[in-house]
């Protein structure tokens, strides 16, 4: 069957074949059992330490946040990428911003900012001012920031508004 000439002339070949098969099976079973538990745990733990609740996790709207946006992380990102123009607290008074025309939008101006939707803010930040008919001096940040980071920045920008952003604009 495997080597018909050899098998018929050398009877000891059969046990060798069986031993080889058994060894292969043993290897297959052994390697199948060992790794999964470790891999699975390592992947799960950092994401969601508490046990997930009953309902299946579903991903909502297409552009929705993967996790709750973190305004503290957003603050750090804002200081790095946005404050030079928009000012550390969104007053539009960053050193670079003062020289620009038009001036960077004042993110602490709640009357103006609170009317803008999250999706609109996401688009301006990701694609830049030109993508929404605003000045190209407001650069696109999608190449530097992940979607998660953009949502973090939006959470921080929302926290700057006076009067405060009450979350009523989706
Ligand atoms: C080089 C300067 C500069 C930097 C850096 C900058 N912006 Fe801007 N941004 C502007 C200017 C100028 C405008 C106003 C555009 C206009 O009015 O046409 C603006 C406008 C905006 C607006 C309002 C858009 C609107 O419709 O009114 C948002 C929101 C915004 N920027 C967010 C950010 C965020 C978040 C960052 C950091 C990731 C950032 N910007 C970095 C210059 C900048």
Image (spheres, helix red, strand yellow):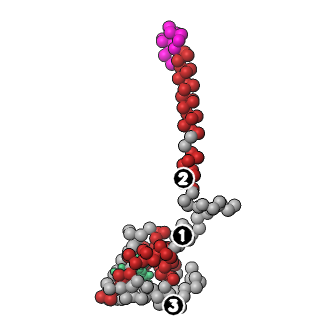
Location of residue 158 in the rendering, given as x and y in whole percent from the top left corner: 51, 82
Residue corresponding to mark 2: 42
Label 2: few (<14), some (14–19) or many (≥20) C-alpha neighbours in 10 Å: few
Location of residue 58 in the rendering, given as x and y in whole percent from the top left corner: 61, 63
Residue corresponding to mark 1: 65
Q: Identify the element where label 3 is drawn.
A: loop
* Dot placed on the residue nearer the N-terminal end, 2 or 3: 2
Of tags 1 and 3, which is closer to the observer? 3
Q: Quadrant of residue 15?
A: top right
Residue at 57% across / 56% down in the picture?
Answer: 44
Of tags 2 and 1, which is closer to the observer? 2
The answer to whether residue 125 of the structure is visible from this angle is no
Residue at 55% across / 21% down in the picture?
Answer: 19
* Dot placed on the residue nearer the N-terminal end, 2 or 1: 2
Instruction: Tell me, for residue 162, which label it has, or none.
Output: 3
Q: Identify the element where label 1 is drawn.
A: loop
Label 3: few (<14), some (14–19) or many (≥20) C-alpha neighbours in 10 Å: some
Location of residue 67 in the rendering, given as x and y in whole percent from the top left corner: 55, 68
In the image, the segment drawn in magenta is 1-13
Location of residue 75 in the rendering, given as x and y in whole percent from the top left corner: 45, 77
- 38 sits left or right of 91 in the view: right
* On-image quarter of the C terminus: bottom right
The answer to whether residue 148 of the structure is visible from this angle is yes
Of tags 2 and 3, which is closer to the observer? 2
Residue at 47% across / 73% down in the picture?
Answer: 73
Q: Quadrant of residue 54?
A: bottom right
Do the numbered discs 2 and 1 sit on residues whose CB atoms are within 8 Å? no
Q: Quadrant of residue 25?
A: top right
Residue at 53% across / 73% down in the picture?
Answer: 69
* Quadrant of the displayed image that contains ligand 1: bottom left
């Amino acid at each position: 069957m495997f080597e018909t000439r050899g098998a018929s002339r050398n009877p000891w070949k059969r046990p060798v074949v069986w031993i080889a098969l058994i060894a292969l099976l043993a290897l297959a079973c052994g390697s199948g059992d060992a790794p999964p538990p470790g891999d699975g745990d390592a992947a799960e733990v950092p994401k969601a330490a508490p046990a997930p609740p009953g309902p299946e996790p579903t991903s909502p709207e297409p552009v929705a946040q993967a996790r709750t946006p973190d305004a503290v992380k957003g603050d750090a990102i804002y200081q790095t990428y946005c404050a030079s123009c928009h000012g550390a607290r969104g007053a539009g008074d960053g050193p670079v911003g003062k020289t620009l025309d038009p001036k960077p939008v004042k993110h602490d101006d709640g009357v103006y900012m609170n009317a803008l939707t999250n999706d609109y803010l996401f688009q301006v930040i990701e694609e830049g001012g030109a993508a929404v008919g605003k000045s190209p001096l407001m650069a696109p940040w999608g190449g530097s920031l992940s979607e998660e980071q953009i949502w973090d920045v939006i959470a921080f920008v929302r926290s700057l508004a006076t009067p405060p952003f009450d979350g009523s604009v989706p």
